Image: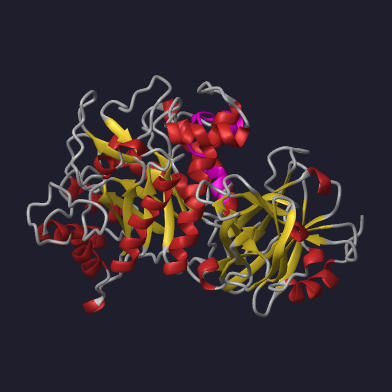
Amino acid sequence: MKIKACTMILSFLAIIPAIHAGDTDAGIAEWFNMVPSAPHAGQNCLFTASISSEYRNKGILAFFRSHDDAFSMMLQDNGENGDEKENDRIFSRLLQWKSKSGLWYCLIGAGDNENDMKYDIPQAFMVTEKPTEYRGIWADSWNKGFLTKEQTIQMVKTIREANLNAIIAEVRKTGDAYYDSAYEPRATNLPDPDYDPLKHLVELAHDTSGGQKRIEVHAWVVNYRIFKGDKKNPSFPPNHILGKHPEWASINSKGEKSDNGSYYLDPGVPDVMDYNINVCLDIIRKYDVDGINFDYVRYPNPGWGYNPIALKRFRTLYKREDTPSPRDSQWLAFLRQQVTYFLRKAYVRMIAVKPRIKVSVCTIGWGDIPGGDFRKTDAHAGGIQDWAEWNRRHILDINCRMGYKRQHDTKQKIQFQNWSRFTLGNQCFRMSTIGIGSYLNTFSGTLEQIKTARMYGSNGFVLYSYNNPISGKASPETFFKNLRNEALPEWADVPPFAWKISNPNGILGGTVKKNGAIQDGMEISLPEINLKTTTDGTGFYAFLDVPPGKRRIDAGGKSAGNIEIKPGHITTFDVHLP
């Protein structure tokens, strides 16, 4: 098996950003990944790719290119070069960034010679001159932090002095608002009726006068958990969304709406999707936030999702008349798809309004990850969150994986390591930060977990939480002082997001109707490059990574037209079928 790598490097200069349809097969790599995701010059990196069965017996190469440099390297599945096991279909290679910093592109090629090479979809990443790191902290709105002007001033001062560079502020906790909302009632624990916490927070954090460092502000939005109240007789205010639309509430298999006093909107109700998206669009249109941080993008627990509207959709899509059990495989696939498709539509609609907005999600890592198999975790098997798929689909920018484990507990310490290793090994050219439950740990325990995240190649961490940053009797003031001295002695910029700067691919999305009616669950494909998806309950579809050029679109197995895709642009193509 001989491959002319030098010749292919020259060909690669023409491959990116313009790849011909006949050269592209999006099914070569189920995913490919690099750790760290934003390396600095001279840093060692691990490149891995899960190769589909059709291409495993061919030569597998990774191609890299910057504006004036290019190289390639063979990937192997031999239990060496970073590959854990031989013949596990994971191909890998270790490399060191000796080349200059800047914007780089990479893609996977498969073939036995240059004439039969097929290429996966290219990805962009940045190499920086010096280390970068997300250093975030969640600030909840149940407790003091930014509820008053004085609190906000103190919080920003504390965080800036600690050399943290991102604040994730909870601006929607239970269907309420800590900002000027067009959709939801003002939070009841804000003492000053004229105070706008989010506006003030953004002004202070972004103020760089006098040489101050700019701190990012991400609006933390609790997505589906929408109310907390009495377990049996909740009283929804008339201006609350469950007061207006009680039919949108999620229900479990026993017919209950309360999960220990928490009430949820059901992800399987199409109107819920658009409502939650509109709440976020309202925020990013009014405020100069750096990101939207979604929390509770999931069902409460296994056994939920039995809202009548959602059940009717499930029965129609799967041609069934029964009520599925909580462990029914088709039912679980349906549940996972609802939260995935919410995030897909939310991502596309938000970046259409503000392209630089960073979309992050608080993802769960309950228990352990048996054998490194995400499908065996509670997060996946219970129909809760398929966040490994979200990374592969690129429907988020930052995976804030919540690693809330006690470092002093041997079992939980190992779980933290296992989840961190998996998270970083499956970020798929997006950013993954390790969420650390500092409130569960002593300072030394939190410090150990920060070191672990860095050791595994993370480009950042997020601490929970500002109001309660440490377990035991130590004061928050002491915690933040020690954090700077021991872990953050120097300022670090947030990592650059290459796909926001120069994405070699485009986004394609739109709505599908037949005879004027929204189509739910219709297959949409780009057959020339082996991409396919289905529409959601609102009829929306999207592809997040489409190489530029003319593309044919099929709907329901029939040609629906052709469209020109441009790199770094969102192209809208609504399908109208007779």
Percent position (x, y) of residue 290? 36, 64
388 or 509: nearer the eye?
A: 509
Residue drawn at 76 percent across, 38 percent down: 86
Residue 424 to residue 284: above or below: above
In this view, 66 is above or below 49 = below
Nearer to me, 2 or 262? 262
- Quarter residue 357 falls in: bottom left
Residue 421 makes an appearance in the image: no
Q: Residue pushed farthest left?
A: 192
Q: Position of residue 374 (x, y in %)?
A: 57, 35
Tag count in the figure? Answer: 0
Q: Give the prevailing secondary structure in the magenta stretch.
A: helix
How are the residues colored?
secondary structure
Which residue is rendered at x = 86% and y = 51% of the image?
Answer: 58
Q: Is residue 338 above or below residue 48?
A: above
Q: Position of residue 6 (x, y in %)?
A: 83, 71
Range of residues picked out in magenta: 370-391
Name which quarter of the figure residue 101 lies in: bottom right
- Residue 156 x, y percent position in the rendering: 21, 61
Relative to residue 205, is residue 393 drawn left or right? right
* Residue 210 in view in this figure: yes
The image quadrant where one finds the N terminus is bottom right
- Residue at x-position 76% and y-position 76%: 14
- For the C terminus, which image quadrant? bottom right
Is residue 388 on the magenta stretch?
yes
Q: Is residue 232 above or below residue 531?
A: above
Taking the magenta stretch, the answer to whether it contains residue 536 is: no
